[in-house]
Image (cartoon, coloured by chain):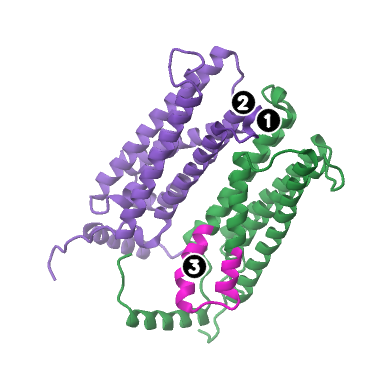
Chain colours: A purple, B green
């Protein structure tokens, strides 16, 4: 009825499910901190034993919680400009990368202090692949979508790949976290794990919480009605672009 | 030009990527068989040691390869009737369930023979959740989509949930397989795993192959242009239904 229609509010269901994802994410960090504090002596950079504990804490904050939250910004900030939302998305991923890097340095330094070999386990293989691709995805994403930014046509062709790789990396990071939890349990409490000791139950529960966080984030991202609707000006722009390209090239079959 | 237009062929890209998924899936089974055969004494139901090996082999065939392939049928059989494709989808999941059940019986029987406790590890927790939900999803899916089959309106509301849970269960099954591989390595070769022995490298490679299989299946399923196009008669039917429901109920916000 009006020239500048009011932007629709977020769907109510979305608000509740996003709240659930944040409660789960904070529960993951809290339970990880509780495991480290209660059973593993806490965290300290200058103790060769406690240095290790920096690793799981940082990885779960960076590669699970923040990585997941960065994917949600387009659903949560529905009425901000695309560019602000994009910058926030890149910024959260940047913090995730820095925190994960600290976690990585901690574990390599711990191995060095103790004379342990690096990179032999399935956990380490998955983790280094996840981190390496995550860094590459960030750099590519920054270059193509933010600065200097590629042409519309390159962006729109790269975007589905960026989204797919992003989802894959969150899933791989979660799987790597689960592998890390199990590995740590079998290193530290191998003889009592099968007696259902409380440390084992706590760490298993942590694993399930991480899975639940990933599942809720995945649900938010895949629900069609919860996609960010394009703002009026973006719609006009993309229609112009669509007409331009459809006139320029015939539709291809794949 | 014609009343019954020729159905479009599968996109060429799809054919190659489906072929890649099948090569990866068969590689997963082959490498698992090689690990068991070469390093773990092979498979036998009547040996209390070798009975265990039935478990990983069956789980990888059922919960990884067949479960993944069942999701691909709508992309691969694009020009068959929806009903035939649905029956094939249900049938492959049924075989997957039966094979996984054999694998489950094998591990519980092995634990019983050896006096090992059940269900204490993160691998077992994830696995039982994956199998339980997989069975429930199959039963619900059969009841709602095949026999007796729910109303159009219930089906179309349940379908996105069915698809989301299906994707989640394949991912959870893959994560569980990775946990199983790592657990087995830390049980059997804990002291030499960090020396990069060939068994460790083979089993880690198996883990990466499973991840690659999942990634390729996920890529096929999420690529928008590769969705199964509705057949002409399905389109007519769903348009009728759409008109019917849109007249009947106002659009809701979530």
- Is A30 positioned to the left or the right of B4 in the image? left
Q: Which residue is mark 1?
A: B186
Residue B201 seen anywhere in this rendered image of the structure? no
Residue A166 seen anywhere in this rendered image of the structure? yes
Mark in the foreground, 2 or 3 = 2
- Is A137 positioned to the left or the right of B171 in the image? left
> What is the spatial separation of the Cα atoms under label 2 and label 3, in whole angstroms?
43 Å
Q: Secondary structure at mark 3?
A: helix
Which residue range is magenta in the image? B138-165
In reply to whether residue B159 is colored magenta, the answer given is: yes
As drawn, B136 above or below A95: below
> What chain is tagged by disc 1?
B
Question: Residue at (41%, 35%) from the top-left corner?
Answer: A29
> What is the spatial separation of the Cα atoms under label 1 and label 2, in whole angstroms?
8 Å
Q: Quadrant of the N terminus of chain A?
A: bottom left
Could you tell me residue B112's position as x and y percent? Answer: 77, 43
In reply to whether residue A93 is colored magenta, the answer given is: no
Taking depth in this image into account, of B85 and A248 the one nearest to the observer is: B85
Question: Residue at (40%, 79%) from the top-left corner?
Answer: B242
Q: Which residue is mark 3?
A: B159
Taking depth in this image into account, of A244 and A215 the one nearest to the observer is: A215
> What is the spatial separation of the Cα atoms under label 3 and label 1, in whole angstroms?
41 Å
As drawn, B185 above or below B126: above
Question: Farthest residue in the bottom direction?
Answer: B3
- Is B59 positioned to the left or the right of B14 in the image? right
Q: Do the residues indicated by labels 3 and 1 lie within the same chain of the protein?
A: yes
| Tag 3 and tag 1, C-beta contact below 8 Å | no
Question: Residue at (34%, 82%) from the top-left corner?
Answer: B248
* Crowding near the residue tagged with mark 1, few <14, some 14–19, many ≥20 C-alpha atoms within 10 Å: many
Could you tell me residue A121's position as x and y percent? Answer: 62, 29
Q: Which mark is residue A187?
A: 2
Could you tell me residue A58's position as x and y percent? Answer: 43, 29
């Amino acid at each position: 009825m009006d020239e500048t229609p009011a932007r629709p509010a977020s769907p109510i269901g979305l608000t509740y499910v996003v709240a659930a994802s944040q409660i789960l994410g904070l529960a993951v960090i809290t339970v990880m901190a509780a495991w480290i504090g209660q059973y593993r002596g806490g965290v300290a950079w200058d103790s060769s034993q406690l240095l290790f504990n920096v690793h799981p804490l940082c990885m779960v904050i960076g590669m699970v919680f923040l990585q997941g939250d960065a994917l949600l910004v387009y659903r949560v900030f529905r009425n901000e400009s695309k560019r602000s939302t994009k910058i926030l998305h890149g910024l959260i991923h940047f913090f995730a990368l820095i925190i994960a890097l600290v976690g990585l340095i901690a574990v390599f330094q711990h191995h060095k202090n103790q004379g342990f070999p690096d990179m032999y386990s399935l956990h380490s293989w998955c983790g280094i692949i996840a981190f390496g691709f995550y860094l590459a995805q960030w750099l590519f994403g920054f270059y193509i979508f933010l600065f200097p930014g590629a042409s519309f046509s390159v962006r729109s062709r790269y975007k589905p790949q960026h989204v797919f790789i992003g989802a894959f990396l969150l899933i791989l990071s979660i799987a790597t976290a689960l592998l890390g939890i199990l590995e740590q349990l079998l290193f530290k409490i191998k003889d009592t794990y099968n007696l259902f000791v409380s440390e084992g139950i706590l760490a298993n529960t942590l694993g399930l919480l991480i899975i639940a966080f990933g599942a809720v984030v995945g649900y938010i991202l895949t629900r069609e009605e919860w996609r960010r609707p394009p703002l009026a000006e973006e719609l006009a722009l993309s229609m112009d672009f669509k007409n331009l390209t459809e006139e320029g090239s015939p539709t291809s079959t794949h």
